[in-house]
Amino acid sequence: MSESILFDGPVCPVPIRDRGQVIMGHGSGGKLSHDLITGLFLPPFDNPVLRAGNDAGVVDATPNTRLAISTDSHVVWPLFFPGGDIGRLAVCGTVNDVAMMGAMPLYLTAGFILEEGLELGLLEQVVTSMRLAAAEAGVQIIAGDTKVVERGKADGLYINTAGVGQLFAGLNISGHQAKPGDTVILSGPIGDHGIAVLAARGELGFEADVLSDIAPLNHLVATMLETSNQIHVLRDPTRGGIASTLNEIARQSQVSILLEETTIPVRPAVQAACEMLGFDPLYIANEGKLLAIVGRDDAGKVLEAMRATRYGEEAVIVGQVQDEPAGRVLLKTAIGTTRIVDMLAGELLPRIC
Amino acid sequence: MKYVDEFRDAGLVKSTLDELRGTVTRPWVIMEICGGQTHAIMRYGLDQLLPPEIELVHGPGCPVCVTPLELIDKALAIATRPDVIITSYGDMLRVPGSEQDLFSVKAAGADVRVVYSPLDAIKIAQKNPHKQVVFFAIGFETTAPANAMSVLQAQSLGLDNYSVLVSHVCVPPAMHAILSSPANRVQGFLAAGHVCAVMGYWEYPPIAEEYQVPIMVTGFEPVDILKGILMTAQQLEAGKAEAGNAYPRAVTFEGNRPAQAVINRVLESCDRKWRGIGLIPQSGWCLRPEFIEFNAEHRFQVEGIQSEESPLCISGLILQGLKKPDECPAFGRECTPERPLGATMVSNEGACAAYYRYRREYA
């Protein structure tokens, strides 16, 4: 090419089309996870409940009783970190997935995969933490399973939980229900869990004064549903952060979501850690926050009701739903420009310099 | 947050833009060298705010993007050995080599670890005396002091299981290469603030003089970048071509002398291939011969690996500021961050990734 006379010319690597193996990015909650679900899991299991693509499947148990059913596996490391541990996470994660369908979670099951050599005292601490979280959420753990694997085959302890809850009557809450004109409410500051766990690993050589936000959100959800029948979507933005969750909703509902950067709360310590590592807080995991998409007329009273609850004290309006461009999340920056907020692609990686 | 909020202040952005609009009378092409600046420009949409006379083109300052294919292939060859733990900065793991990337070899069983600093790799070497620990030391002048320091530490600790795969590149030779190209359109540079925090900017007055281009040391926040553009435009309009500093809170003329001394003790200038651009003479740093025992290429005998690249994307033109990412036919179609054709789509600092992440709506 004549344009680059002094150089070898434009060159680039051979593309990697499809990987033959699972990579860590498949578990990031972002684009690769999404592709794995839609490409590999959905086709063989395909049914209308699964196809809805929500945090929990909703089925009619009897003509008057609808159930939300969900499952979640927990592989966090370290097992204990500021603000929580794998036990509290295992209970709250599933409770929240069920609650996000507009259901009151009732029962959980718990499956434990234990690594040979795990201290029983440590397991006891985890179980105590599960008991306390279940009591706070008002759910019972009614069945369980234990497997032990050889040393080196698991990271101490993995927990799977499944949960079932009963839907509040007359609701149709789903990622498909966001409508142009709706208001987006966020229940509090973002990124606490991801940064707390990252700091607890000690690998990146920094300490952060941040507690994980792990919390059962079902009582908050119940309060919101008592306040308004105009709650269209509820989601807890876990892995992939609010950016990935809002992208899922925008795609499911074929709408655009416009966020106001200045309204999105981020604690200073989380902001500082993100600045240092080159992360965007929009992509950092939360375990005790929810996003609600609410009819505009009810947004004020829903917000007020949320702020009166323990886990919704810092709730704020962060954006609105609009027609175009469908399937996209946009962000109005503090300096008045607009940019795309995409799904997380692959794993979050610290920057080089 | 101090040192961040005041440089993202909407009022300061506006007043700097007003001053810029009052300054420019003619079209100017300005290149920001550093990929970190490209991302900040896209993330804040700064180019949407600039007066139409100012065109920003994106430079080669993405360390991951310009790391040559054969170095990645060498890293992959070393990583697949059973006795090796290979470590690098996170971004580097996702860059495709000829056939795979480090994440894929990790998935296949290799011990590949992300570290935030090469000094963490030293700790891994101390904890794993029966493994060979290799740090894939890439980057511009910014990362060179820490990478060089790790070699000195390994030496003083007597570690015989630590080595570095060095692929360092330097900014001034790349500026020479861009400016001496007949296709060059660049009339002024925003120099990379982080690089200059280490090196100072004493290397730039001769370049400004020789090619008659202003070169302005520039930071990474919106107000910093606009300040750099403003100071460059003021010189261009006044017919001046000098090296200046729009980032004085981090950069001095001399730079960080102790850091430069560490670099000079461990590394020496050498020819370096830039991915997508080609060989630029004396454009990189290699380990000095007296540190050959810490040279992973030598230790694992991978010096001979040569890699051929296929002309499938235009990242070379993008890295030289001759094309913009959205002018590539593959952009956002065959080439996305999940399935990158080129390194510029992979890195947090790559121009294509910046366009894709923040801008593809408008492409």
Image: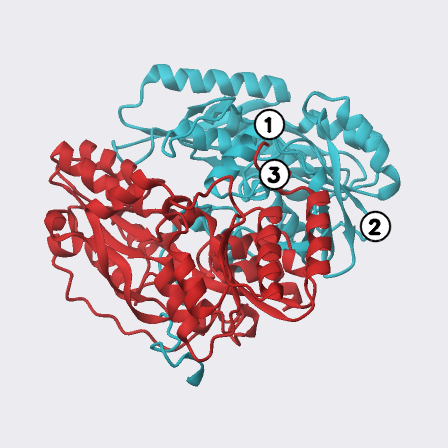
Kindly indicate whether the residues beneath marks 2 and 1 are on one polypeptide chain.
Answer: yes
Quadrant containing the N terminus of chain A in the rendered view: bottom left
**Where is mark 1, residue-wise?**
A107
In the image, taking residue A171 as reference, residue B113 lies left or right, namely left
In the image, taking residue B260 as reference, residue B211 lies left or right, namely right
- Can residue A245 be spotted in the picture? yes
What residue sits 67% from the left and 28% below the top? A218
Chain letter of mark 3 equals A
For marks 3 and 2, give the one nearer the viewer: 2
Please tell me the numbered disc located at residue A67: none
Sequence-first disc among 2 and 1: 1
Where disc 2 sits, the SS reads loop
Sequence-first disc among 3 and 1: 3
**Where is mark 3, residue-wise?**
A69
Q: Position of residue B320 (x, y in %)?
A: 45, 70
Q: Position of residue B334 (x, y in %)?
A: 49, 71
Give the colour chain A carries in the figure. cyan
**Where is mark 2, residue-wise?**
A181
Q: Nearer the viewer, residue A217 or B283?
A: B283
Q: Residues within 10 Å of mark 1 (few under 14, many from 20)?
A: some
Residue type pointed to by label 2: Gly
What residue sits 67% from the left and 44% below the top? A59
What is the spatial separation of the Cα atoms under label 3 and label 1, in whole angstroms? 10 Å
According to the colouring, which chain is red?
A: B
Q: Residues within 10 Å of mark 2 (few under 14, many from 20)?
A: some
Residue type pointed to by label 1: Tyr
